[in-house]
Image (cartoon, helix red, strand yellow):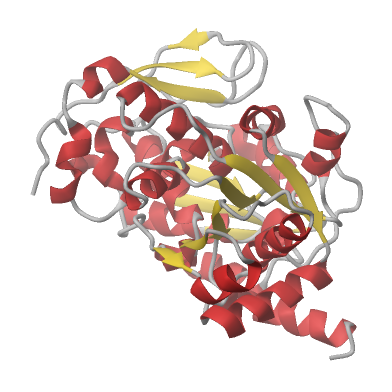
Amino acid sequence: MDLEGAGMSYVEKLQCGSCREEFPAGRLWSLCPDCAKPLLVRYNLGAIRELDLRGRLANRPPDMWRYLEVLPVDSRDEVITLGEGFTPLLPMPQLTRKYRVRQVLTKDESLNPTGSFKARGLAAAVTMARKLGARKLAIPSAGNAGGAMAAYAARAGLESYVFVPCETPDANVLEAEILSTKVELVEGVITDAGRLVGERKDAEGWFDLSTLKEPYRIEGKKTMGYEIAEQMEWTLPDVILYPTGGGTGLIGMWKAFDEMEQLGWIGSTRPRMVAVQSDGCAPNVDAFFKGKEHAPAWPSPVTYAAGIRVPAAVGDFLILRAIRESGGCAVAVSDRETYDATSEVGRAEGLLYCPEGAACWAAFRRLRAEGWIRDQDRVVVFNTGAAQKYTDFIRKFQASSGE
């Protein structure tokens, strides 16, 4: 098994995604101290390019840490892992034929530990938090992130504190309660939970693992981009549809594509990135169509797709930048469309999409009907979590719809 070259970190620095100010790695950082925007990890990609890393991947374990040199750790020995990553990229032959496109694939993140893509980001964030000296971790969560953080914190021997809105699916709350040091239910939405973490973290000695408020969750999430490229034999799809709350995965994949081009693994062609939100909580869609750089907080967010019930994202400008640079778009779909999409995918392909993934399929159907998705396109649709965690919400929607 090839672990050569895995005895050092290739991290050069941290850089603000907004003001571009640079900061040294090797200590705990939150947001940029100059402008309070997200910090991004920068690597010595020239040195990594000399390693022929791509050629050695076949002999590495099938997890996200196979890309170790473009992750912020020194070696596998310090990694906190539950086996996350390298999820399948599944063909959808029935729906490909029905919608008359070249190819449609599902990137099925439900097979990650704790049942969602959140495992990737939290594995990286918890690994680095422990490495850099944190002993108590806190996170606001709309659902899956809380359980993932608690699981990796437990694995690392760290205390964890999870704050979730009262309307969070029961399965997510129970998961966090079993795994975490303490779970607190909060009136309101995820931004209210985040406010409580911010108010109490200094007194309690917590390190805040909120979305994009530290540099390393994005590094775990970006591995989705590396995997898609590897699984498609070092090409990229024409379109990626991604459910967008905090947007870490979309930003991370965009970062991964840039890194891979600099490494010589792919060319300059990029997928058109589609940010999918609910019409009951669509701040980035609104900002995209109004030509704004930032998305004002969405008032009174309502959707049963809990993971995208995020009224404001600290990395909104990075989400919007990636969409526009890619020639992509932003789409808001209704809960009705999402529910119908769940049924279509399940009956046609045997895949049980979570509501956030189903929102992406609903967006696919609309964009295909409008001609924005073309006959010759290869399309990747993200299913970001296990639908079984949302059965109570699906039943509530069925009841409210008279089904």
Residue 143 position, x and y percent, is: 63, 61
Residue 189, horizontal then vertical, whole percent: 78, 53
| In the image: residue 234, left or right of residue 99 | left
Q: Residue at x 54, y 23 (%)?
A: 39
Q: Is residue 290 above or below residue 285?
A: above
Residue 185 seen = no
Which quarter of the figure has residue 357?
bottom right
Residue nearest the viewer, comparing 32 with 234: 234
Name above or below for residue 367 compared with residue 338: above
Question: Does residue 161 lie above or below 68 as drawn?
Answer: below
The x and y percentages for residue 196 are 72, 43
Q: Is residue 96 above or below residue 351?
A: above
The residue lying at 28 percent from left, 40 percent from top is: 67
The answer to which quarter of the image holds residue 328 is: top right
Depth order, front residue of 225/173: 225
**In the image, 243: left or right of 224?**
right
**Residue 224 x, y percent position in the rendering:** 44, 47
Where on the picture, by quarter, is residue 353? bottom right
Which residue sits at x=37%, y=32%?
266
Question: Do we see residue 123 in this rendering?
Answer: yes
Q: How many marks?
A: 0
Quadrant where the C terminus sits is: bottom right
